[in-house]
Image (cartoon, rainbow, N blue to C red):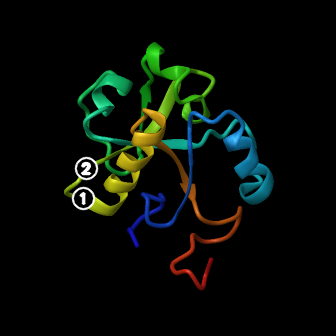
Amino acid sequence: MEFGPRALGCRSILGNPASRGVADLINAQIKYRERWRPFCPSMLDRVAPEILQTDHPSPYMTFTFDVAESWKSRIPEVVHKDGTARAQIVTKETNPRYYALIEELEKHTGNAVVLNTSLNRRGEPMVCSPTDA
C-alpha cells in the first residue's frame, strides 16, 4: 500500500484510457462523482515526455500537464476538457509490479498509459486490503 492521498497503483481502480466510456462506467458503477472531475493517468516514464511535453517528474499525481495534441485522441478518458491531465509517472524502480502491468496493457493497446482512480466510494477512505474492498 502506498502512503498519501492518491491511489498510485496499489489501491486503485484501473481502466483502459483509450476505451471511450470507461470513465462514465466507473463513475456510474463505483465512484458516483461529478463528470467534470476527470480521472487521471498513470504512465510509464519512457513515454511521459512525449505525452506531457516535459521531463518534469511527477511520481505522486500532484502536477497537471498539457497533453500533446497527438495523444489527446489516444487516451481521451484521462484528458480533461481543457486538454490537461494530472499524471503519475511510473518508474520501474519505484513500483516494478505496476510498471509491468502498464507494459502489458501497452502490448494490447499500444499505449503505456492506464486510467487510475482510488479504490473507494465518495466519502469513504481508500481500501487497505482485499477484505476492505
Q: Is residue 108 above or below residue 100?
A: above
What residue sits right under mark 1 in the picture?
94
Q: Residue furthest left?
A: 93
Residue 13, percent across and down?
58, 58
Residue nearest the viewer, comparing 101 with 79: 101
Q: Secondary structure at mark 2?
A: loop
Residue extending farthest top: 69
Q: Quadrant of residue 126?
A: bottom right
Residue at 74% across, 42% down? 24
Query: Could you tell me how many numbered marks the image carries?
Result: 2
The reply to whether discs 1 and 2 touch (Cβ–Cβ < 8 Å) is yes
Note whether 56 is above or below 59 in the view shown: above
For badge 1, the amino acid type reads: Thr
Amino acid under disc 2: Thr
| Quadrant in the rendering for residue 107 | top left
Residue 98, percent across and down?
A: 36, 58
- Tell me the quarter of the picture where residue 45 sits: top left
